Amino acid sequence: MQIDKINRTPLHWAVTGKHSSCVALLVQKSANIFAETAARENVLHMAIEDENIELLVFLIDQAKTVGDIQKLFTGKNEAGKTPSEVAKGKPSKSRILSVLKKAGDNTVGSSMCILM
């Protein structure tokens, strides 16, 4: 597998490039969905940063089938933020946090009001 100088894999590039079909193909070919960049970002951080709900849902569904999804939910980037904490600074935060909470992300917070 090719990794660039800041530890981004082809999957990271596909997620940040919003290439849904490439993401699907890479996951089908067993790309490591849990890989982190040098900035300790995982694919959920990246999908949330771009506010790409479609990819976020796909990645969560795929991660559930291959490993411990909580590892993605609780992973902290170099700024010390989990994916849900990154979402809180986004215009579409309600939709993103709703997706995360529905998927079982315990870092979202049970008292949060989620508006659709």
Image: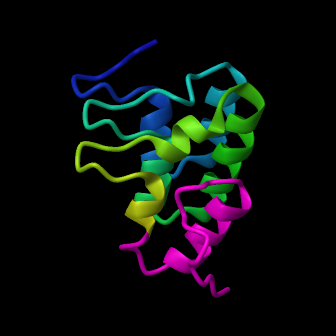
On whether residue 105 falls in the magenta region, the answer is yes
User: Is residue 17 something that shows in the picture?
Assistant: no
User: How far across and down, in percent of the image, does residue 41 sit?
Assistant: 36, 41
- Please determine whether, in this image, residue 76 is positioned above or below residue 38: below
On whether residue 29 falls in the magenta region, the answer is no
- Please determine whether, in this image, residue 97 is positioned above or below residue 64: below
Residue at the spot 48% in from the left edge and 44% down from the top edge: 74
Could you say which is closer to the camera, residue 91 or residue 108? 108
How many marks the image carries: the answer is 0
| Residues shaded magenta | 88-116
User: How far across and down, in percent of the image, does residue 26 sit?
Assistant: 62, 28
User: How far across and down, in percent of the image, does residue 59 sit?
Assistant: 64, 44
User: How far across and down, in percent of the image, does residue 91 sit?
Assistant: 43, 81
Residue at the spot 44% in from the left edge and 36% down from the top edge: 12
Dominant SS of magenta comes to: loop
User: Is residue 11 something that shows in the picture?
Assistant: yes
On the rendered image, what quadrant is the C terminus found in? bottom right
Residue at the spot 36% in from the left edge and 73% down from the top edge: 89
Would you say 37 lies left or right of 110 here? left
